[in-house]
Amino acid sequence: MDGTAAEAAAVAGVGHQDMATMLAALAPRDHLETMLASQMAAVHVAALRSLRRAADSAEHPQIEALYLRQAARLMHLFARQAEALERRRAAAEKREMEQVWEAERQARLQESEQREEERARQEEQRLRTFGLRPARRGKAVENAGRRKNSRGAALNGPANGPASPDPSPG
């Protein structure tokens, strides 16, 4: 048994084995949960003692009522502590799930980017196979079929738009 359980057992006035059993049942995951579980175990023991004292003082109704009120308050405190522990665990599980989801999202995004890069490489290879070169914006520009004269002007018509009108009158 660790030091926290021994300290909690001493405060609650129960045996070390009983406190260790209570802490084990709550299965704390970290130091904060261990402290909360120790408090819960001590409150539980105190509530049971109050109930036992109330039963022992059945002959004195005012004292019995005092112990019953004390036990009720302690049981209510225990319930609030149990809710706090549950909220803390739920938040931790939510954070863990969000981290898993984010990791999965990142993996899918990376996989998608790799597929897109592979498609672009395949498209570029296909265009080169047919004598085309990929444009900067993903459009293919035809290289073959355009002949140029020594000054770089197209011999077979302008590259863009319709051909010039015929200058001869007709």
Image (cartoon, rainbow, N blue to C red):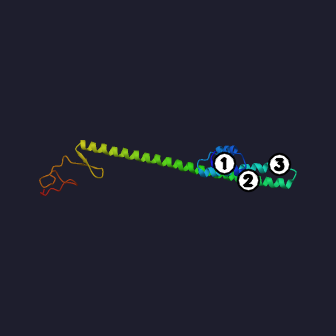
Residue on which the image places disc 2: 74
Residue 155 location, x and y as percent? 14, 51
What numbered label is drawn on residue 6?
1
Q: In which quarter of the image is residue 115?
A: top left
Element marked by disc 2: helix
Residue 58 location, x and y as percent? 85, 50
**Which of 63 and 149 lies nearest the eye of the viewer?**
63
Q: Are marks 1 and 3 in contact (CB under 8 Å)?
A: no
Q: Which residue is drawn at 78% across and 51% down?
A: 50
Q: In which quarter of the image is residue 108?
A: top left
Mark 1 to mark 2 CA distance (whole Å):
21 Å
What numbered label is drawn on residue 55?
3
Mark 1 to mark 3 CA distance (whole Å):
29 Å
Image quarter where the N terminus lies is top right
Instruction: Give the residue type that dot 3 points to.
Output: Ala
Q: Which residue is drawn at 43% across and 46% down?
A: 107
Residue 100 location, x and y as percent? 50, 46
Q: Residue at x 77, y 54 (%)?
A: 70
Instruction: Give the residue type that dot 2 points to.
Output: Leu
